[in-house]
Amino acid sequence: DAGITQSPRHKVTETGTPVTLRCHQTENHRYMYWYRQDPGHGLRLIHYSYGVKDTDKGEVSDGYSVSRSKTEDFLLTLESATSSQTSVYFCATRRREGNEKLFFGSGTQLSVL
Amino acid sequence: AQKVTQAQTEISVVEKEDVTLDCVYETRDTTYYLFWYKQPPSGELVFLIRRNSFDEQNEISGRYSWNFQKSTSSFNFTITASQVVDSAVYFCALSEEGRGQGAQKLVFGQGTRLTINP
């Protein structure tokens, strides 16, 4: 395991409020990813990071922003949450270059009412 | 862009039956990697296998086997003598180049929910 901790594990919030999800890893992995999981869609990439302060958009990045100020932390922010962002969010890490497997966190269940 | 299709949304079989989960992919890359992950009812994602596009040999690990056919762009997963503990959602994934050195991403299929009944 890659020592990945996601917080919070569950959150209920209201439409229009900002929300930040945190991913913390203890293995010094260079690459970090945020995915969302929805029925019928599998896992879809939101944003990813290839180093401190280096991030890029994924397939479903609208309405989300990320920051990575330290190797160990990757934050996902929903600037103004909408009901369509109700989902399970997974953080993942990869140790180094090359097509190694991703290690996943336990997920955050977010409900936007 | 890369695409992964798992056409079987749900499969239900009786314990001890063999079951095959299909995965078809699309890519323009000549070098790529394919993965399978398992998501049991507890929700975590468990890595099962990684295969590169140059290695077309089938792989077997206990009751699990994988059939990679480049000619049909498929990477199917078979469970032999299925058990109740195999009940899970299974995802197939394909690597895709991202921005930044070494920043490969994974593109996932929709997943197949497998239920093994006692």
Image (tube, coloured by chain):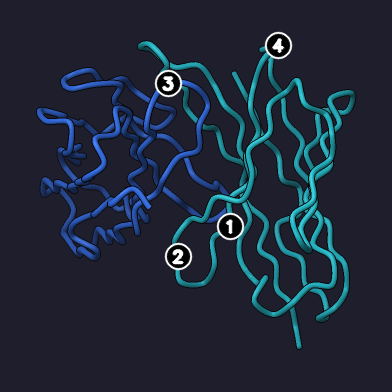
Chain colours: A blue, B cyan
Q: What's under tag 1, amino acid-wise?
A: Lys
Q: Amino acid at mark 2?
A: Gly
Q: Are marks 4 and 3 on the same chain?
A: no
**In this image, A53 relative to A91: left or right?**
left
Task: In the rendered view, tell whether residue B70 sits above or below residue B24.
Answer: above
Q: Which mark is residue B43?
A: 2
Furthest residue in direction bottom, as rendered: B118
Instruction: Name the image quarter holding residue A18.
Output: top left
Give the number of the disc on residue B30: 4
Q: CA distance from mark 3 to mark 2?
A: 27 Å
Is A45 situated above or below B84?
above
Q: What amino acid type should be assigned to the residue bearing mark 4? A: Thr
Q: Which residue does the numbered mark 3 point to in the structure image?
A: A97
Q: Disc 1 sits on a residue from what chain?
A: B
Disc 2: which chain? B
Q: Closer to the camera: disc 4 or disc 3?
A: 3
Q: Amino acid at mark 3?
A: Glu
Which mark sits nearer the N-terminus, 1 or 4? 4
Q: Are labels 1 and 3 on one chain?
A: no
Q: Secondary structure at mark 1?
A: strand
Element at badge 4? loop
Look at the numbered discs 4 and 3 and tell me whether their residues touch, using CB distance below 8 Å: no
Query: What residue is disc 1 on?
Result: B38
